[in-house]
Image (cartoon, helix red, strand yellow):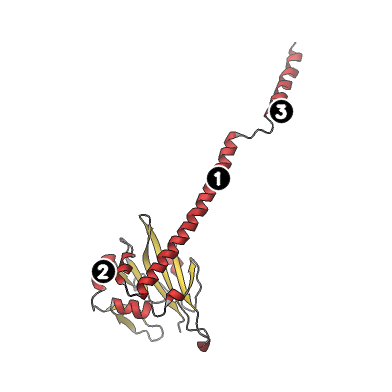
Amino acid sequence: MRKLLIPLVVLSFVVACKKEAGKPVPNMIDSIAQNKTDSAGTVQNIVNKEAVLKQTNDEVLKALKNKDYTSFAFLIHPEKGIRFSMYAFVDIKGDKHFSKADFEKYQPTKTLFTWGAHDGSGDPYKATVNDYLGKWVFSKDFTASQYSLNKFIGGGNSLNNLKEIYPKDDFTENYIKGTEKNGEMDWKTLRFVFEEFQGKYYLIAVVNDQWTI
């Protein structure tokens, strides 16, 4: 009798398996669907982020071109403020840094600040906030430049440590190619570093770069 029961149990198991064959496992379907949803959401988030950063980049350029420094100040990080670097190398101790409040305080004034040193001569560069923004930062019309996100286009012999100083932040680059007359060595680029704060991207750094001696 025991010998007869064993084959029956095995047969029942085989039949049950055949009936279930081809039926997807519910948990597996849920997992696949969730993965697809997450992937689509991630892609959409990336696209949205890139669009927002491009828009914010253009807003900064527009404010600089129009010398609308009130709008520019509105884009400065409320807590971290903003740092200005004359060249590609970001000097944490030497570069001029303002809190948002200090920028708004000194921008309308004739107060002179030392922004760094001229490449080659080493002479300190002193200027008001308005002169620095108008004559150094926006020395060319960067609204007509080549744009990139988190990627360097221009580069010379100046040490570029932006990614080391701001490893987790996004940056944009606005590059103007040099002229044939000067062997394309008179290129210039303007980089903005952004950090998200309460759902919005704010400026934390403005970095100029150009050919240095």
Which residue appears at 39% of the width and 71% of the height? 61
The Cα atoms of the two marked residues, 2 and 1, are separated by 47 Å
Q: Is residue 115 above or below residue 100?
A: below
In the rendered image, is residue 25 in sight? Answer: yes
Q: Report crowding for label 3: few under 14, some 14 to 19, many 20 or more residues within 10 A (C-alpha).
A: few
Q: Mark 3 near mark 2, Cβ–Cβ under 8 Å?
A: no
- Residue 51 has which mark? none
User: What amino acid does circle 1 point to?
Assistant: Asn
User: What amino acid does circle 2 point to?
Assistant: Glu
User: Could you tell me which secondary element the residue under label 3 belongs to?
Assistant: helix
Drawn side of residue 73 relative to residue 207, left or right: left
Indicate the position of residue 134 as horizontal and vertical percent values.
34, 78
Q: Report crowding for label 1: few under 14, some 14 to 19, many 20 or more residues within 10 A (C-alpha).
A: few
Q: Report crowding for label 2: few under 14, some 14 to 19, many 20 or more residues within 10 A (C-alpha).
A: some
Q: Earlier in the sequence, mark 1 or mark 3?
A: 3
The Cα atoms of the two marked residues, 3 and 2, are separated by 76 Å
The Cα atoms of the two marked residues, 1 and 3, are separated by 29 Å
- Residue 18 has which mark? 3
Drawn side of residue 35 relative to residue 107, left or right: right
- Quadrant occupied by the N terminus: top right
Q: According to the image, label 1 marks what residue? A: 35
Indicate the position of residue 130 as horizontal and vertical percent values.
30, 77
Indicate the position of residue 14 as horizontal and vertical percent values.
72, 25
Task: Please name whichever residue, 157 or 148, is drawn nearer the observer in this view of the structure.
Answer: 148
User: What amino acid does circle 3 point to?
Assistant: Lys
Q: Earlier in the sequence, mark 3 or mark 2?
A: 3
Q: Give the number of marks.
A: 3
Task: Please name whichever residue, 95 or 62, is drawn nearer the observer in this view of the structure.
Answer: 62
- Residue 104 has which mark? 2
